[in-house]
Amino acid sequence: MTLTGIGPNPLAQGLERLPVAPTNLVIFGATGDLARRKLLPAIYNLAHEGALPGFFNLIGVSRGELTHEAYREIAAESIRRFSRTPPDESVLSGLLSELRYVSGGFGDAETYATLSTALEELGAAAGEPMSRVFYLSTAPEYFSVIVGALGAAGLAQSQEFDVRAIIEKPFGTSLAEARQLNAEVLSVFTESQVFRIDHYLGKETVQNMLAFRFANGMFEPLWNRNYIANVQITAAEDIGIESRAGYYDHAGALRDLVENHMMQLLTLLCMEPPVTFSADDVRDEKVKVLHAIRTPRSEEIDQISVRGQYGPGVSGGRPVVGYREEEGVPEDSHTETFAALRLLVDNWRWAGVPFYLRTGKRLARKITEIAVTLRPVPHLAFEQEGSLGVRPNQLVMAIQPNEGVSLSLGAKIPGPRMRIRPVNMEFLYGTAFLSQSPEAYERLILDAMRGEATLFTRNDEVEAQWRICDPIVSAWSGASAALPQYEAGSQGPAEAQALLLEGHQWRAI
Amino acid sequence: MPATNDTVWAAEDTTPAAIEAALRELLIERHSESDGYVPARVLNLICIVERQWRGEIANRLRRVGRYHASRTIVCAVSEGRRTIDAVAAVAADATPATGEHVLTHETVILDLGPGHLEHLESIVDPLVITDLTTLVWAPHGHWQAVDALRGISQCVLLDSAEDPDVAGALRRAQRLLAERYVVDLAWLRSTPWRERIATLFNQPKRRVLLGQIAQIRIRNVAESGASALLLCGWLTSRLGWPQGQLTRDGHGRAIGAMGEVGVMLESVPQDVPGLGGITIGFRDGSELSLDRGPGGLTARRRDGGGSERSWKLLGASRGEGGILGEGIRQSLLRDPTYRDALDAAAGMLT
């Protein structure tokens, strides 16, 4: 019997949950924080919703010596603790009943021989070709080690089934490292097999930016340099570094959030409408934006970027220590916990519009938002006296914690005089939709199992992001000047004001 | 609805205009307490119920989880009543903390008589939130009222399984579907089955078997014949088969790609409504089956030689509260395959 000419599955039409091919999902770093807090609960929730394929197996790989049963217990405890849905014990035991654990070093050939045997056994038990998805949720220094070892063990390619690799962030810590890692990954896998995760792209509110821009006719005529005065992208956190000193003190705010998440928000905001929403059409447009962002020159780094580090202060009514007093942080650390940039996108649509990016730890509150400020009206005939007056319209896309979109408008204050004050027109996700947003990782894991790459970062995208941030990272790492300090619980360092062009102001965090 | 605090207004022998004004005042009052209270604006739900059973319906609505309508208007019908009494409430699930939002939902309970139903639109129209989808649900069969609300509702929620006359229930759904969208809970009970069946045939080498189906046996509780028929209708319509036929004893036939296909609907004992299992037999004697079980559906594949293997398709049961919530959610979506499945199912009984 020939399979040539078999059309699409007629039974899949109209279904909300599309079928997924039988899959063996292998998590490297299976006992790590990410796996326990996010990945295992996400996989459980997919099982709970009935979204996993009939033949699905989970294999954890890590260095610790554990039995299958011990790892099952760790997984069950993680799911019970962190799942957004209270676990159904029948589903949970069904999911974990065949869970396997492979113990070994990520560079040891023996680890991969054991893994290969497990995959073969599970495939044979299913009696079906099973796709393989390798999820690299380890420390970044192991990414190339694992990829190389998978290639050497013959686990990276197959003619019979799909093989895919999901790679966590950070994808390199510099442009050179990102290029090197891309070269190593792409010497083993093809680009279509690689799924570089930026979990912001799995958030419903981030995906809604595409719907907002391209499903509504009213914004496109305004979406350019003629009507937009400036854009501010803020990702503020009120917490400190918690237990992540080891990672954070090497990364800093720029690498932790700006190079990846905030650049992604910038591309979605600025990109041209894609021809289709296929992975490559969308990513082609995003890469064009990144290419259009002016690479910072070394002599202008001081004018277009500001960094800072939090000192002691008060957060949520409680006194908190400064960054250098945090456990695990060196007393003389020069790592920035605040970063702000002013970037320009040199293309026809955006030339001359400043894009202000700002992120930091221990700021006044947790908020991620994009604020688009329109140019003021050219002439005002209204009274300004005795009121807040007319302000430029501002469109705010709130990513978290209050998910929604608001538009500030000038409106007449009731009364005998023609006085104006700004009012807000608000759309809140919670008020307009019944469904709860799934966790970003649920969507991304499912997409990777399906081979759907739209919400993942392509190799040229990662390198283009690093091209923009690399000169700033280099300048900051070589700087001898004292790092500006800001009080914990504040709006950030006062020096950030210097980034703003005349007439612009930071939105309150 | 799990409200922690309500703002309530009530009046006897009142009018829609007075109720509408009261709702507006209640919302302003709520907002003046805290601007963290924000009204949900997703969906209007109009329920027409027998007054004596309205408590049972209220209980069912409480169990829909997060899928509350933004404004629920309950029309409680009692014999002999000629005036309208009303209770309106704005309920919040919590008190908002600084910088947080808490959703509010509005509920209006109207006590009215059968004489009000013919022109129910004129009573309810001022009370629904303009520009939101309006869903109508008449679980006790006030179809006259459902028809009266034709002009202001976009969707009808029904459960074909609750009508002992399955053919009549499917014909009614067809008639309503001609003018509004229909969400049939009997159809939604088949959703996990449809998803899993689609999965079983998703690989190209399995998909070729769709052309070799010789028999379909669907197992369901006696009261869920509509779900079984709709599942059967879905399968035949998706596969492009001409209309099949079914006798009253649940036996029948359809014409598949390679000739006649036997169809059997069998009643099985089960403690929850809905489907119990499906077996699809192929011309070479092999079979694929799905059966309900704890933690999901059990799939079995038996080849022509008789060897068999089984595996689990994981998924938690939604329960009947979950099904009603799903029905409310689905009123904001459109399933492009329901109409064909319904027509095929109804056609099998003619």
Image (cartoon, coloured by chain):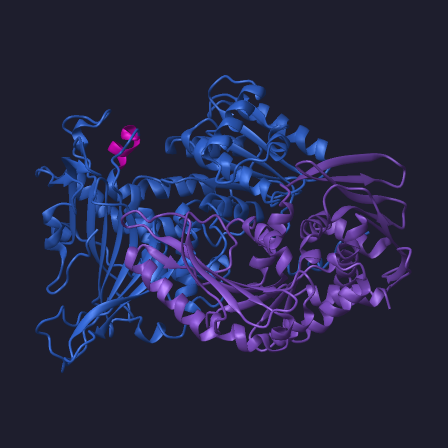
Chain colours: A blue, B purple
The total of numbered circles placed on residues is 0
Query: Is residue A95 left or right of B312 when viewed as pictured?
Result: left
Let me know if residue A434 appears in the view: yes
Residue at the image point whose x is 57% and y is 58% from the top = B328
Q: Is residue A6 magenta?
A: no
Q: Please name whichever residue, A508 or B83, is drawn nearer the observer in this view of the structure.
A: B83
Residue A488 image position (x, y, % from top left): 17, 38
Judge whether A406 appears above or below B67 on screen: below
Q: Please name whichever residue, A276 or A153, is drawn nearer the observer in this view of the structure.
A: A276
Let me know if residue B260 appears in the view: no
Residue at the image point whose x is 50% and y is 31% from the top = A80
Residue B140 image position (x, y, % from top left): 68, 61
Q: Main secondary structure of the magenta part?
A: helix
Q: Is residue A248 magenta?
A: yes
Residue A231 image position (x, y, % from top left): 24, 61
Query: Is residue B140 left or right of A248 when viewed as pictured?
Result: right
Query: Is residue B32 left or right of B146 when viewed as pictured?
Result: left
| Picture quadrant where residue A503 is located | bottom left
Judge whether A152 appears above or below B321 on screen: above
| Picture quadrant where residue B334 is located | bottom right
Residue B35 image position (x, y, % from top left): 29, 57
Q: Please name whichever residue, B169 or A488, is drawn nearer the observer in this view of the structure.
A: B169
From which residue to which does the magenta span run?
Answer: A244-251
Residue at the image point whose x is 56% and y is 18% from the top = A67
